[in-house]
Image (cartoon, grey):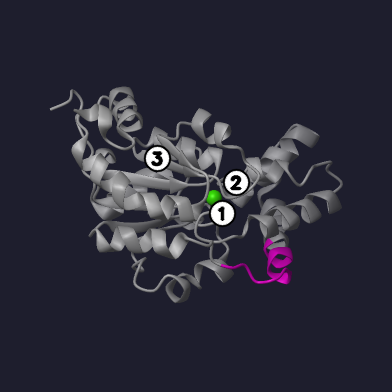
């Protein structure tokens, strides 16, 4: 009976909503900023400095909500609000370059506590790991192999360079599924931000939301997270149980 399985109710609700019979996890599609790295404080500070200098009113908090968008999409969103039109492409590229410089001036970002345990659970379970980030921040992406050794193969990475549409569009996760040669019902997405959760759910993946900053869990639930954890260590500890439950729960119950 599904009733007594940990996370059974959440999994069953997900299966019904997506009209799946069951989930067979074969690939984990994992976000970077705010998930693998505790980098959002630096990103919001760099964005706030850049956009304020440009003379556009903004708050630091609002940049947490744009998390997951490509840099150009974020710039266009603010230009539209201030001026009613997109930024000129050359100016947008120059602004994003300056944002990257401001980010790189800030203290080095650290891996998210608990994230190494989390990815190791996926590896030990034989589940393929794919990086899926809207970032083009080379300074962080280049550290992945050092901070997460043996986790993300060079050809298992989707960055802002590989997609036309950033999150919340489902394209980044759909492309990740194609890379890993898995279907949506064989995929687990790990995300910390509403736009990323929305992207993962729209791609049809069982999407786990993890709150790692000021974004409340309700925002991740509303964006379509199948299950939400309050911290990365909590998710890492629960993950073996969740994987077992995913293999057990079917719709209708078997
Ligand atoms: Ca993120």
Residue located at (48% from left, 57% from top): 161
Badge 1 density bin: few <14, some 14–19, many ≥20, Cα 10 Å: many
Give the number of the disc on residue 149. none
Q: Earlier in the sequence, mark 2 or mark 1?
A: 1
Distance between the Cα atoms at labels 2 and 1?
9 Å
Work out whether mark 3 precedes mark 2 in sequence or the reverse, and give the earlier one: 2
Sooner in the amino-acid sequence: mark 3 or mark 1: 1
Q: Quadrant of the C terminus?
A: top left
* Horizontal arrangement in the rendering, residue 231 relative to residue 152 (left or right): right
Residue at label 3?
207
Quarter that holds the N terminus: top left
Q: Can you give x and y, in whole percent of width and height, for residue 155 in the image?
A: 33, 65
In this rendered view, identify the residue nearer to me: 191 or 177: 191
The answer to whether marks 2 and 1 mark residues whose Cβ atoms lie closer than 8 Å is yes
> Which residue does the numbered mark 1 point to in the structure image?
34
Q: Which residue is at 68% across, 56% downward?
A: 41
Is residue 41 something that shows in the picture?
A: yes
Dot 2 corresponds to which residue?
Answer: 67
Work out whether residue 73 or residue 7 is closer to the camera in this orientation and state it.
7
* Magenta-drawn segment: 100-110
180 in magenta: no
* Crowdedness near tag 3: few (<14), some (14–19) or many (≥20) residues, C-alpha within 10 Å: many
Indicate if the residue with disc 1 has its beta carbon within 8 Å of ligand 1: yes
Does residue 133 show up?
no
Residue drawn at x 73%, y 40% is 78
Q: Residues within 10 Å of mark 2 (few under 14, many from 20)?
A: many
Q: Position of residue 93 (x, y in %)?
A: 66, 56
Give coordinates of residue 80: x percent, y percent.
Answer: 72, 35
């Amino acid at each position: 009976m599904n009733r007594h399985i940990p996370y059974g109710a959440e999994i069953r609700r997900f299966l019904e909503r997506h009209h799946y019979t069951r989930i067979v996890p074969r690939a984990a599609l994992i976000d970077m900023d705010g998930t693998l790295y505790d980098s959002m404080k630096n990103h919001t500070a760099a964005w706030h400095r850049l956009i304020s200098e440009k003379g556009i009113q903004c708050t630091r908090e609002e940049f947490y909500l744009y998390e997951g968008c490509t840099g150009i999409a974020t710039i266009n969103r603010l230009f539209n609000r201030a001026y009613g039109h997109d930024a000129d492409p050359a100016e947008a590229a120059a602004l994003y370059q300056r944002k990257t410089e401001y980010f790189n001036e800030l203290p080095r970002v650290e891996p998210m506590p608990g994230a190494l345990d989390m990815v190791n659970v996926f590896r030990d379970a034989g589940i393929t790991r794919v990086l899926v980030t809207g970032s083009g921040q080379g300074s962080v992406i280049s550290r992945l192999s050092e901070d997460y050794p043996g986790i993300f193969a060079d050809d298992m990475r989707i960055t802002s360079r590989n997609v036309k549409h950033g999150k919340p569009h489902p394209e980044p996760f759909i492309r990740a599924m194609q890379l890993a040669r898995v279907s949506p019902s064989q995929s687990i997405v790990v995300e910390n931000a509403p736009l990323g959760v929305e992207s993962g759910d729209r791609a049809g993946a069982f999407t786990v939301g993890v709150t790692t900053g000021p974004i409340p869990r309700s925002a991740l639930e509303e964006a379509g997270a199948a299950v939400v954890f309050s911290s990365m260590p909590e998710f890492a500890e629960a993950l073996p149980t969740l994987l077992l439950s995913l293999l057990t729960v079917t719709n209708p119950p078997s």
